[in-house]
């Protein structure tokens, strides 16, 4: 009888995973293989290096093979892990939430700059909160602020609430189902919001169909589809924002790579001049900051 094959080491199975992912057309095979092997073995990056020559068991090899097959089939790493880092915080994902993107951190940066020096405590409204990543990142930076996250998806709000609890801000956060601003009571000066943020769906319906395989198949449609020209959510938000934004408040929205000028024009038509534009790490105009005409 032939001797059984020697078990693979962690370093060998990682190389194999990397080759499989590269062959499947995954853009970042090395990083993805490391994360997936680490996830299956419960090891950090340092742990993978320290234990590189340890043999993996059959059970571990099977677990790694299953994860690698999912990634090779197009499922994003964040979906496989069920979590994604944003603003240095770990967010749980759900089937009804968008996976937060690094570009969206530009909205947090722009918002923090825009509210610096404003009177506290700040009241924040996050429209289309998804995982709650914008609201929770802002609350983690502004310890006296309070915030409301709304979304049309009740499932997304359940995930946002669990993230707020896990990240220690739930005492200052509330979540509600809403079609943008519709059910929210307008306020006088005291009850209006000093900061409103939104990363609405902004991809034109026709373009949604040609999205990269690991976007269209895994993020929910209503987190992506911005209607015929991609701008429907902005129209809905701008048309009603006046009664919710305090007189010295700011609205910060994320826009698609070629939408800054069109969104600026729409907002100006509702008495909201654009005060500044912030570019993302790729140099794209990504976050627009508006405040009411004085
Ligand atoms: C692009 S995702 C942004 C999610 C999250 N804020 C982020 O930045 O990762 C847009 C979000 O808007 C929500 N949404 C879509 N239509 C909506 C509507 N009419 N009213 C409220 N929320 C809506 C979606 O469910 C989704 O969570």
Image: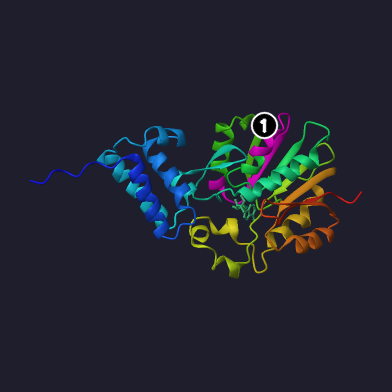
Q: Position of residue 54 (x, y in %)?
A: 31, 35
Magenta stretch holds residue 246: no
Q: Residue at position x 77%, y 54% from top?
A: 240
Q: Which segment did they paint magenta?
A: 136-156
Q: How many other residues sit within 10 Å of disc 1, few (<14), some (14-19) or many (≥20)?
A: some
- Picture coordinates of residue 43, whole percent (x, y): 41, 34
Q: Compare residues 274 and 185 and report the one nearer the observer.
A: 274
Residue nearest the viewer, comparing 157 with 268:
268
Left or right: residue 148 compared with residue 195: left
Give the residue at the far front of this rendering. 53
In the image, residue 120 lies at what x, y percent?
A: 80, 31
Please report the residue visible at 44 percent of the width from the left and 57 percent of the height from the top: 74
Q: Which residue is mark 1?
A: 172
When the figure is inspected, residue 159 is found, relative to residue 262, above or below; the finding is above
Q: Residue at x 73, y 55 (%)?
A: 237
Which picture quadrant has residue 55?
top left
Mark yes or no: residue 224 visible.
Answer: yes
Residue 117 vs residue 134: left or right?
A: right
The reply, left or right, for residue 179 in relation to residue 43 is: right
């Amino acid at each position: 009888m032939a001797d059984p094959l020697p078990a693979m080491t962690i370093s060998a199975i990682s190389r194999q995973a990397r080759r499989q992912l590269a062959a499947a057309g995954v853009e970042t095979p090395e990083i993805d293989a490391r994360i997936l092997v680490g996830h299956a073995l419960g090891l950090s990056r340092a742990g993978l290096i320290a234990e590189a020559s340890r043999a993996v068991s059959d059970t571990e090899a099977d677990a790694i093979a299953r994860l690698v097959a999912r990634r090779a089939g197009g499922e994003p790493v964040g979906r496989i892990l069920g979590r994604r880092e944003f603003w240095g915080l770990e967010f749980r994902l759900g089937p009804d939430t968008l996976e937060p993107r690094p570009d969206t951190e530009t909205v947090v940066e722009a918002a923090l700059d825009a509210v610096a020096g404003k009177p506290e405590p700040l009241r924040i409204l996050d429209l289309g909160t998804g995982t709650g990543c914008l609201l929770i990142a802002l609350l983690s930076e502004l310890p006296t602020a309070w915030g409301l996250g709304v979304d049309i998806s009740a499932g997304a709000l359940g995930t946002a609430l669990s993230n707020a609890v896990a990240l220690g801000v739930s005492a200052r956060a509330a979540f509600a189902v809403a079609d943008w601003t519709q059910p929210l009571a307008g306020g006088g000066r005291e009850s209006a919001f000093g900061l409103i943020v939104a990363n609405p769906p902004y991809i034109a319906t026709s373009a949604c169909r040609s999205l990269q395989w690991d976007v269209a198949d895994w993020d929910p449609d209503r987190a992506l589809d911005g209607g015929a020209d991609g701008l429907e959510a902005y129209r809905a938000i701008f048309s009603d924002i006046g009664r919710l934004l305090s007189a010295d408040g700011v609205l910060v929205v994320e826009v698609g790579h070629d939408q800054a000028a069109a969104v600026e024009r729409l907002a100006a038509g509702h008495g909201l001049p654009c005060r500044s534009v912030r570019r993302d790490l790729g140099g794209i105009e990504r976050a627009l900051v508006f405040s009411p005409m004085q």
